[in-house]
Amino acid sequence: MRQKYCGLFVILWLLSFVSLTSCYATVAEGQDPSKLFEQAKNAEKRGDYQYAVNLYSRAIAINPNNSVAYNNRGIAYYKLEYYDLAIADFTQAIELDPKNVEAYNNRGNAYYKVQYYSQAIENYTQAIELDPKEALYYNNRADAYYELQNYKQAIADYTQAIALDPKNVEAYNNRGNVYYGLKNYSQAIENYTQAIKINQEYVKAYYNRGLAYKELQNYDQAIADFTQAIELDPKNVVYYIKRG
């Protein structure tokens, strides 16, 4: 079920933001926005995303036309799982800079999280139009197509992501998942195997390949893959259950 936007929460946040902006405008006088950005980045590295939000809000108070500050604060909100606030900030970043490709991709990610897959695709498409050589945007759009069961387009986008980045293990694994969903288990195994060749510690590919081998009744190979997944992630109960 799609999550609903917290309208009341947004209104309350906007009211508090007006107050905070006024406060920050006084506090931030004479402050260097680049230092605020540096402090915010350090806060993000520590996982203190709320403090990062506060710091970016100060930067915005100094310069309300700073597209990057809105985008960065949107990322912090995203990390806090405040997806509606993240979307609002990414939207503001785009309004200030219509060529802010990162903001389009980020807004796509936020829409994806709230299961608005069509809107996610629109944003990833815009990002691709601005930067058609970035594999990540194709991979992300393929994820959204997959959720909409548009498997043909998902495979096309994963394939393009791989063409742009031949070592993209996520794209190989995800394309394998599409083939698995289509019950084309041999093709799925080929993609999972390619992901493993690129990264021999990529546990998801072992697990997924084990599932595909199981469907082909190749139980010895399935057990071997589940065993490898367990060695890489011994605390994952699901791997033990599948091997059992």
Image: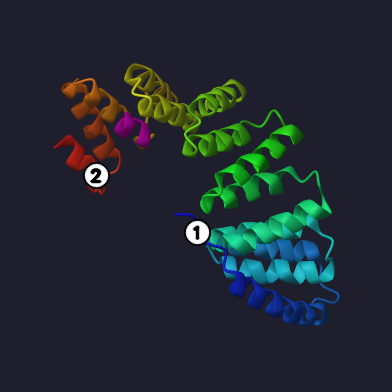
At a point 61% along the width and 70% down the height, the residue shown is 7
Q: Judge left or right: residue 161 versus residue 98.
A: left
Q: Secondary structure at mark 1?
A: loop
Q: Label 2, label 1: how many angstroms apart (C-alpha)?
A: 27 Å
Count neighbours of disc 2 (C-alpha within 10 A) and say few if under 14, some if 14 to 19, many if 20 or more. few
Please, is residue 168 above or below residue 230 in the view? above
Residue 117 figure quarter: top right
Q: Nearer the viewer, residue 197 or 132?
A: 132
Which residues make up the magenta segment?
Answer: 204-208
Q: Amino acid at mark 2?
A: Val
Count neighbours of disc 1 (C-alpha within 10 A) and say few if under 14, some if 14 to 19, many if 20 or more. few
Q: Judge left or right: residue 200 versus residue 107.
A: left
Q: Amino acid at mark 1?
A: Gln
- Give whichever of discs 2 and 1 has the lower sequence position: 1
Q: Say which mark, if any, is on residue 238.
A: 2
The quadrant the N terminus occupies is bottom left
Q: Secondary structure at mark 2?
A: helix
Q: Say which mark, if any, is on residue 3.
A: 1
Q: Position of residue 48 (x, y in %)?
A: 55, 67
Q: Is residue 90 visible?
A: yes
Residue 179 figure quarter: top left
Q: Nearer the viewer, residue 185 or 27?
A: 185
Please, is residue 132 above or below residue 42 in the view? above
At a point 39% along the width and 26% down the height, the residue shown is 196
The quadrant the C terminus occupies is top left
Q: Judge left or right: residue 196 versus residue 111.
A: left
